[in-house]
Amino acid sequence: MAPQLVSKPPIRLACVEVSSFRRLVNTRLDLEQATTILVGANNSGKTSLLTVLRNFLGEKGGFKSYDLSLAHWPALRRLASVWEELADDPVTNSKELESWQAQLSTLLSCMPVVDLWFEASEGAYHHVEPFLTSLKWSGGPVGVRLRVEPASTVEELQALAWSYREARNPVSNLDKKGHAWPIDLLDYWLRHTSDLRRITAYRLDPTKGPATTGTLTSMQQLPADAQPVDIAHVRRIIRVDLVPAQRGLGAEEDDARTGSVTARPGLFSNQLLKFARQHLNVETSGNGKSKDLIAAIANAQAELDETIYTALEPSIEDVEVLGYPSLHDPQKIRFRTRIETADLLAHSTAVQYQLNTTSADALLPEHSIGLGYQNLQSLSFQLVSFRAARLNPPKGPPAAVHLVMLEEPEAHLHVQVQRIFPSKAHGLICPKDDVYSNLCSQLLISTHSSHLAHADSFAHLRYVRRVPLQPGDVMPTTEVVNLGNAFGTDKETRIFAERYFRVQHADLLFSDAAIFVEGTSERMLIPLFIERDFPVLRRKYISLLDIGGSHAHRLRPLVERLGIPTAVVTDLDPVIPRTTDKGRTVRAAVHIAGQADLECGNDTLTSWHPKLTNFQAFAAPGTAELEWTSETGVKVRFAWQVPVVAASNQWPSSFEDSLVLSNIAWFKSLDKKVDPDTGVLARPRGALGRVVDTVVDHPQHDELLEALHKLLRGSFSKGDFAATMFENITNGEAVTCPPYIADALAWLQAQLSPRTDEAP
């Protein structure tokens, strides 16, 4: 996809730093000027990132007690236990001021915080002026902190403490297992949600932030005398809208009309109705009002009034015969309708689709159209509606920055649509008129779709990574990895990775672990071995990538940044260097047995790990040779062919001959295999038949190895062989997994098995 051409506005949201919200303990998210895409495995924190921004900046935000980070629950409960011991209302007692100030500090340190860092030029001075810390500002970063504050002063804290004490006192002697409210402070806030809806804004010092790119370890400390800033200033800078994941598109129309236009956001008609009520039920003045629409409504109302009177006139005359109205009564009955334009769309067939251009009567209601089309229409209109609402605020100018967040927009969308969606969606939220060219529109998408994620370059991808629980940690945490700089200055490797992912549609970015394999046979058969022999791996989301031994090392930077355990199953590729008549050195592929001057021809093993110079050392590798650990603790397990004990320690050099040497008896049995239904000899044909012939004709293991080498490197179809083996293993044939692969899978299973000190 061609890069998005977006003019540079005077201000944009550059990054967000989050603390103390769910598992976002200290998390930094860098944002692109146009579109940023969040990827990652389930339960990694993608939704939490969208939610915390909505709660702080959305029109209907607000936090709940269980949004508070689990790491702070013990401190909050200790604080509440102190309040339970209060004998008198502390508001009436000015003693122990230092103690209350310490408690206030503890409380605020447990609250969710988000730091917004804007990149602004001098032209954005009027937007950022309330947040500047220096009169000499001439452009650069501008920081704003938003913090949940159930209490901002000692007096407010004392009132909160006493309110909690009064609620807790009647049930304090009851067993907490009875769940009498409130069990603790967190339970108290489940009812007193307004305490967690109080948000305060502060200026940040640009000389002390934002944090450098990479993992955020801590956020800027506010000075003790920091003064709050009117949060209305923040609302004027940035507007945030969220499109949640669409969950209910398949229901029938009758179930959708519940009286609430937000009950079914997936329906295009509901989005249309919401937009109409915001923008069509208009008065005769104000921004964005349509004179033509107002005139049309007035004319329609007048005509309708007259028609109603004409229809009811006989009944009205009958009333007049009875003497009403009298002289002193109102003399004329008239009718005045009030047409609410949007209500004209509030019925089940308000939105219909014309099936062809030749027949105006060939119309179907919305719920008869495919779910993919419904979702695309709904998403598109929601984005357009957000743009309209941003450009026509109730008062004041439009927000300088508009951040639109989409959660899993891929639901029901065709693959081709997913690939183009990010760029098209951004175009829908951008104002069209040049007069708005100074406004910034940014799109933040979370997705589980590899097609949508790979529609753009790595520069737009942010990998939301689950950080494993470390000794001493209370809970696992989340970090966001900027994949745009995963490959550093290695442009060639970055281009290879982007092209590979775009072609393969790999799901590595959403996996619990990864397995890199050499070729087709491994890619087809290893999943069967996992399904049969490794129950823990079977329950995990494993990404299997056919990357080839000569290219696996190119993904090393990506493996390091993703931080997921990885097994690299590859071939030794033994070669012997020879000098040609012209003096050039060439390396010819050979089998291992009986050869001298062997070298490893696999770039992954020679340039990444284990980098052994003595070829014989590959025969009996130890843990140090098999495992590689990055500076950040990412573990990779390498696997290559080793001598097969069951075949007199013959040393294979590919997956196929290792598979054969590990199952000699089984391949021999196929030579005399009989069809159980007919009793006729059912000896295999094709590639499998050629392997069986080779095994039967070479009873000596050393001769068999040499013969297999010649067979596999001749006119042999590895694809046919793999497909036939796949069929046999699927049918329950007792085929042993080559030991070097089984050992690697056992290692990977151990990495993904839950520790004894954490939940699975």
Image (cartoon, helix red, strand yellow):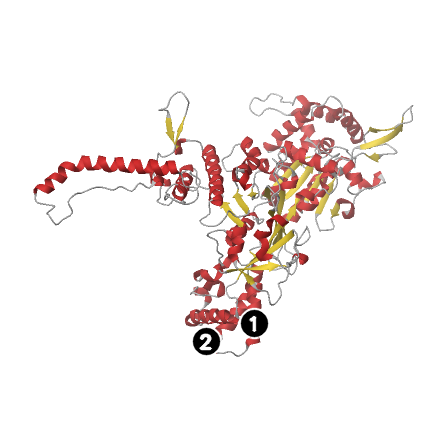
Confirm whether residue 753 shows in the render. no
Tell me residue 315's x, y (percent): 13, 38
Residue furthest to the left = 322
Q: Are marks 1 and 2 in contact (CB under 8 Å)?
A: no
Confirm whether residue 309 shows in the render. yes
**Which of the pair 356/309 is nearer the observer?**
309
Q: Which mark is residue 89?
A: 2
Which quadrant would the N terminus be assigned to in this image?
A: top right
What kind of residue is marked 2? Asp
Q: What element carries label 2?
A: loop
| Mark 1: few/some/many CA within 10 Å (<14, 14-19, 20+) | some
What kind of residue is marked 1? Gln
Tell me residue 351's x, y (percent): 38, 33
Residue drawn at x 37%, y 24% as measured from the top left? 362
The residue identified by callout 1 is 101
Lateral position of residue 724 relative to residue 194, left or right: right
Tell me residue 526's x, y (percent): 65, 36
**In the rendered image of this protein, does residue 487 appear above or below residue 85?**
above
| Mark 2: few/some/many CA within 10 Å (<14, 14-19, 20+) | some
Residue furthest to the front = 327
